[in-house]
Image (cartoon, rainbow, N blue to C red):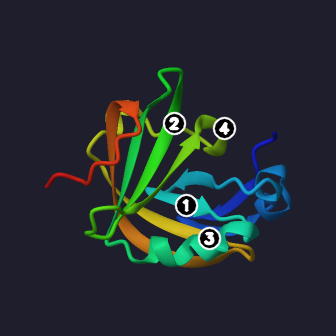
Amino acid sequence: MMAPTIEDDGSEIVKSNYWGSEFAQKGYFFCSFNAGTARLLIPDSRVDELPEMATSKLIVLTRGTWNRKKDALEILFDDGSDEPYSMHLSKDQLDRLIPVSDNGRDLTFSAWSRGPVKLLERPAKFRIVKNLPCLEKWKQ
C-alpha cells in the first residue's frame, strides 16, 4: 500500500488523501508525525471508537518490536482505568518512526477524521521498549 499524503500547517493537517486511500478503505489507522505532534488519522469505519479514546488524560506512545520481528507503535489511551483503550500500528501505518533518541520526550497527540477535522488533542509521552505489547501506563 502506498502511504497517504498529508499537507501540514505545523501540527495541523490541512489536507490529506488518507480517507480515499487503501489504508482507510481497509479500516487501518494511520499515524503521522509533525511539529512535535502525533496525528492519528481515523478511517470512517472506526470513528465510533473515538469515545473510548476521548476518555484519556494522557496518551502513551511506545515504540518496540512486534512479534520479535518488526518495529511497531503502541498507542495507549490512559484514562486512569485498569483496562485503557489501546491499539498497535505496524511500521507501514506510520509516516516515520520516532527516533530512539526521543525516548522520554513530551509530545502532543491529536486524532483526525475526514475533512480533515481534529476530534481530540491530548498531551503524550514517548518511550522505547524492547517488545510489544507493553500496555503499561506512564510511570511518573
- As drawn, 91 above or below 120: above
- The span from disc 1 to disc 2 (Cα, nearest Å) is 16 Å
Labels 2 and 3: the sequence-earlier one: 2
Give the amino acid at mark 3.
Trp
Say which of 27 and 23 sits in front: 27
Q: Position of residue 17 (x, y in %)?
A: 81, 60
Give the amino acid at mark 1.
Arg
Determine which quarter of the picture holds residue 95.
Answer: top right
- The span from disc 1 to disc 4 (Cα, nearest Å) is 15 Å
Query: Looking at the image, do the residues carrying marks 2 and 3 touch, with CB atoms under 8 Å apart?
Result: no
Element marked by disc 4 = helix
- The residue positioned farthest toward the front in the image shown: 82
At label 3, counting other C-alpha atoms closer than 10 Å, the crowd grade (few under 14, some 14-19, many 20 or more) is many
Query: Looking at the image, do the residues carrying marks 3 and 4 touch, with CB atoms under 8 Å apart?
Result: no
Q: Position of residue 90 (x, y in %)?
A: 59, 38
Query: Looking at the image, do the residues carrying marks 1 and 3 touch, with CB atoms under 8 Å apart?
Result: yes
Query: Looking at the image, do the residues carrying marks 2 and 4 touch, with CB atoms under 8 Å apart?
Result: no
**Residue 70 image label:** none
Query: Is 76 displayed left or right of 118 in the figure?
Result: left
Q: Which residue is mark 4?
A: 92
Labels 1 and 2: the sequence-earlier one: 1
Labels 2 and 4: the sequence-earlier one: 2
Q: Position of residue 86 (x, y in %)?
A: 45, 56
Q: Which residue is mark 2?
A: 72
**Residue 39 image label:** 1
